[in-house]
Amino acid sequence: MRKLTITACAALALSSALAGKAVAQVPLTINAGAAQWWFDDDRGLSDKSTPWVSAEWAFNDQWAAEVLYADKSDFRTDDGFLADVTNWQVGLLYYGGSYIGEPNRVRPYGTFSAGEIDVDAGFRDTVETTINAGGGLRWMWTRRFGARLEAKLLHSLDEHRTDMLLSAGFNFYFGDVVGDGAASAAAAAAAGAAAGGAALYSDDDADGDGVVNALDECPDTPVGTRVDSVGCPLDVEQIASIKLKVNFDFDSDSVEEQYFSDVGELAAFLKRFEDLQVDVEGHSDSTGPDAYNQNLSERRAQAVVDLLVNQHGIAENRLRAVGYGESQPIADNATREGRAENRRVMATLEVTYGE
C-alpha cells in the first residue's frame, strides 16, 4: 500500500505541474493525502495517522461519486501488539455551488458512503461493514488544482463502534473547466451552430466564443471560430506536399529540359518552407555492373541537386544527393518500358503548417 500511495502522490504532483494543459477532458478528480484516526475506545487501538488516496467522478455540477482507500500497519493495541488497519469506502459527495468554476474559492461539501474497516492484530482479525457520513471544504487554488479538509464518522454495523477520520490532502481535476481554451470554445461554437449560427451572447462573453470578456484578448472573434484560452483564433493545421520524379535516358546523368519546370516547383516549395531539408534519391535500371549503376545513380541525384542550387538558389546544405543503384526498382527490368521507369531521380516532401 505504501508503494501505491507514493505513486499516487507522485502522479498528483505531476498533474499539478500540468495544470491547465490536461490531456484528458474527463470529469475525474484524483485526491491523496494523510488522515488522523480517532478510534472508538472499545477498539483498544492507539490513535494515529494514515495515508489515503481516492478518485472522484463528477456526475454534474454538484454530485460526484468517490472511491477511497487507506492503509497503515504500525498501530498499537492497548496490550502492546502491532495492528494493521485498512479502510475502503464507496460513496457520494454533494458540493455547495457549481462543481466547475473560478479559482481561489472555497466549496463546502457533504459526504455519504459505505465500506469496510479491517483491523488485523495477528491474533485478532476483524472485518466490519461501516456506514459513513461527514463533511468538508475544498479550496480550489486554480480551476484544476486544490486542497481539501474533511471530517467523517464511520459507524460499524457489526460491532456498533463509531470511529472518526480527519483527513487533509491535495486534489487535481482532469475535466473541462470554464475558460479552459479550445474545449470550452468548441462547446460554445457548437451551441451557436445548433441555434442556427447565432452566438450565445452575454454581458460576460460578448462574442460568444466561450472566453469571458475579462480574459478575451480577441473580443470580436467570428461565430464558430475555434479559440485558445485567451479567446484568439487557433492555428488551423494544413498539409502541403510535393513529389518530384525525373527520368533519364540510358546511361545518362543529364536532366532533360522537359523536367525543368518540375524541378522549379520543388525549388519554390523549398523557398516557401525554408526549414525543410530534402534527400534527392537517384536510381538506375539493372543493365550493367552493380558498382557502375551505384555510381550512375549518385551522379543523377547530384545533377538534380546542382540544378536546384545553381539555377534556383537553394542552399546546398539543405540538399543531400543519395544513390541507390539498381536496388529499388519500381517496374520490371525485363522490359524496355520498365527499365525506363527505373532510370529516375525521386524527391518527396510533406509538411504540416499552421494558417
Image (cartoon, rainbow, N blue to C red):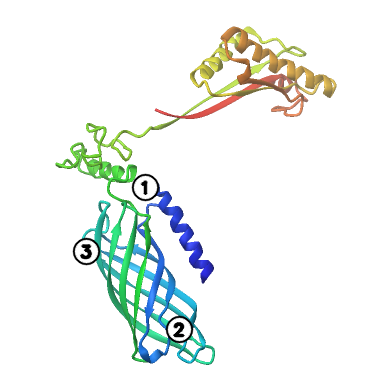
C-alpha gap between disc 1 and disc 3 = 23 Å
| Amino acid tagged 1 | Gly
Q: Nearer the viewer, residue 150 or 24?
A: 150
Q: Secondary structure at mark 1?
A: loop
Q: Vertically, is 57 above or below 38?
A: above
The residue that mark 2 highlights is 118
Q: Nearer the viewer, residue 96 or 26?
A: 96
Tell me, yes or no, if residue 158 can be seen here: no
Q: Earlier in the sequence, mark 1 or mark 2?
A: 1
| Amino acid tagged 2 | Asp
Place of residue 189 in the rendered image (x, y in percent of width and height, measured from the top left) = 27, 41
| Amino acid tagged 3 | Gly
Place of residue 91 in the rendered image (x, y in percent of width and height, measured from the top left) = 33, 73
- Which quarter of the rendered picture does the C terminus lie within? top left
Tell me, yes or no, if residue 345 can be seen here: yes
Looking at the image, which residue sits at the far right?
A: 289
C-alpha gap between disc 1 and disc 2 = 39 Å
Q: Residue shown at 37%/84% (left/top)?
A: 39
Local crowd at mark 1 within 10 Å, few (<14), some, or many (≥20)? many
Q: Earlier in the sequence, mark 1 or mark 3?
A: 1
Left or right position of 53 against 275: left
Q: Secondary structure at mark 2?
A: strand
Label drawn at residue 20: 1
C-alpha gap between disc 3 and disc 2 = 32 Å
Place of residue 220 in the rendered image (x, y in percent of width and height, measured from the top left) = 22, 31
Q: Earlier in the sequence, mark 3 or mark 2?
A: 3
Left or right position of 5 against 56: right
The residue that mark 3 highlights is 96
Q: Vertically, is 280 above or below 228?
A: above
Place of residue 347 in the rendered image (x, y in percent of width and height, measured from the top left) = 62, 23
Q: Residue shown at 67%/10% (left/top)?
A: 255
